[in-house]
Image: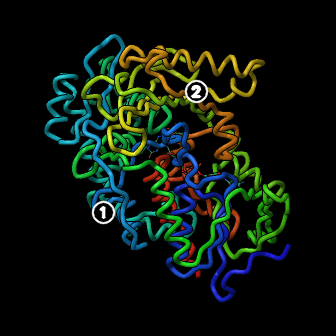
Amino acid sequence: MPHIVVNQNKPRVVVIGAGIGGLTAAALLAHRGYSVLVFDQAIVPGGCASTFKRQGFTFDVGATQVAGLEPGGIHQRIFAELEIDLPEATLCDPACAVYLPGETTPINVWRDPEKWREERQRQFPGSEPFWQLMATLFAASWEFQGRDPVLPPRNLWDLWQLIRAVRLSTFITAPFTFFTVGDALRLCGVGHDQRLRTFLDMQLKLYSQVNAEETALLYAATALSVSQLPQGLYHLQGSMQVLSDRLVTALERDGGRLLMRHTVEYIKVENGQATAVVIRNQKTGEVWTEPADHVVANVTAQNLVQLLGDKVPSGYKQRVEKLPPPSGAFVVYLGVDVSAIPVDCPPHLQFLYDANGPIGENNSLFVSVSHPGDGRAPEGKATIIASSFVDYQQWWQTPDYQALKQKYTADAIARLNKYFYLKPETIIYQEAATPRTFAHYTGRDRGIVGGIGQRIPTFGPFGFANRTPINSLWLVGDSTHPGEGTAGVSYSALTVIRQIEAQA
Ligand SMILES: Cc1cc2nc3c(=O)[nH]c(=O)nc-3n(C[C@H](O)[C@H](O)[C@H](O)COP(=O)(O)OP(=O)(O)OC[C@H]3O[C@@H](n4cnc5c(N)ncnc54)[C@H](O)[C@@H]3O)c2cc1C
């Protein structure tokens, strides 16, 4: 089949994957004058931030809350450049209500910094030096990130972007580069505070994949602070799908094209340069080669290695293979009668789920609840989505997949039932997703989610670069800095398009 003819005078970019990272890169490149073609293997765009509909309910597949919508936030900046409206959204306040084991009153992570200070002082007496340290590091890191550094740098241009983002205030973070949250807790004299540690383990795992002892301090300072003013976490009106839909609108308005149900099977490399991708149309079975001046891969680092086949540089492959085991996710989607939901239920809650589980201590159920009029459920009904991290391997090795899925579903509902009223008469619809489901719908290798983890050897300056060792091949998404989340992958997209432009 002849390749799809796009504007011959503009540099041609092929984007593999229409997740938020790929779509953001694609829309920005199209807006800046590139000829952009996006292929996605799924039926709908959005990847882990897409949705599906069942019996009148709309369920967010993975991501349920969004950072970066405030003025100057990354989504706001990108939507402003694309000249499209930001999705309508409500603030999550508290951002999360965290229930520690055996406790019936939650720790409320309030948006108002003063209210949050009072809450944490009451909950964790003596911990203020730790929180002050986090606030200081966050202020410096946030300013630094706002100047768009390239991390980790891989050539002189990248290094220059990094250097010009540094100010005197940035140096305050330097001595803490090799600190974990556990180190900071000990430094501040609260290393022994088990309640605080459990709270931090639960919250940090959502963002960094690892507990307080392992999470890089500089990463944690940001992850734990973005829920407070002037930043905040938001719940999108309608569904998460609106984020990708708007990016697709901008992409197509600016002449770019998105082809769903097209799987990229292979990236062609000649003389150390990515030159084309091999695509299979899932409907027709047709296979063809699409030439490109740049290839932007919105996939996991593990998927990238597979797409390169024998062209992957051996050092890169080894690095990916040596990464600590990634996580999978198990998610329960419930369509319920509103009588299942307690009055004044916050939009997001977290319960300890598996204190000594297979993927480490203090694994939690993270729960997102729709509210009346937010477009996710018919009147008098609501959605409850509960996710937890799981060891992905057992889902591929189990001799009885359905039995394992049923057991996980029953366990999750039993845990939720301590807070919600979930009975056969209040549960209208239920479905679950496992690593196998994520592998199928998002194409992610073995259904792994959440990026490469924010440990010291894999965060920021030590993580995977957007610039790959192969010329004109770029990696975008949650395997790269600054990590998982729709806001994080949007930063990585912005970095990639700046790098591509700088090369022109
Ligand atoms: C359960 C769960 C809850 C989460 N909660 C939140 C949250 O509340 N807030 C938040 O901000 N983040 C959350 N996240 C994280 C967030 O969803 C992801 O980090 C982010 O959406 C990843 O975006 P991405 O663009 O990197 O990749 P993806 O979303 O994985 O998109 C990649 C796309 O590439 C396509 N693709 C892959 N391989 C190929 C191929 N070979 N050919 C063609 N197409 C291909 C896929 O179909 C997919 O559409 C959550 C994640 C999960 C799993």
**Is 404 left or right of 455, judged from the image as shown?**
right
Nearest the eye: 227 or 161: 227
Three-letter code for the amino acid on which mark 2 is drawn: Val
Quadrant where the C terminus is found in the figure? bottom right
Residue at x 20% of width, y 33% of height: 129
Quadrant where the N terminus is found in the figure? bottom right
Figure check: 472 above or below 8: above
SS at badge 2: strand
**Is 318 left or right of 242, judged from the image as shown?**
right
**Residue at disc 2, CB closer than 8 Å to ligand 1:** no
Which of the 4 quarters of the picture holds residue 22? bottom right
Residue at x 71% of width, y 56% of height: 261
Three-letter code for the amino acid on which mark 1 is drawn: Gly
Figure check: 153 above or below 2: above
SS at badge 1: loop
Residue at x 77% of width, y 70% of height: 276
**Is 438 left or right of 88, judged from the image as shown?**
right
Figure check: 7 above or below 162: below
Binning the other alpha carbons within 10 Å of mark 1 as few (below 14), some (14 to 19) or many (20 upward) gives: some
**Is 420 left or right of 494, judged from the image as shown?**
left
Residue at x 42% of width, y 38% of height: 377
| Residue 197 seen by the camera | no
| Residue 190 seen by the camera | yes
Q: Please tell me which of labels 1 and 2 falls first in the chain.
A: 1
User: Which residue position holds label 1?
Assistant: 72
User: Which residue position holds label 2?
Assistant: 390
Residue lying farthest to the bottom in this orientation? 9
Give the image location of residue 37, x and y in percent.
65, 70
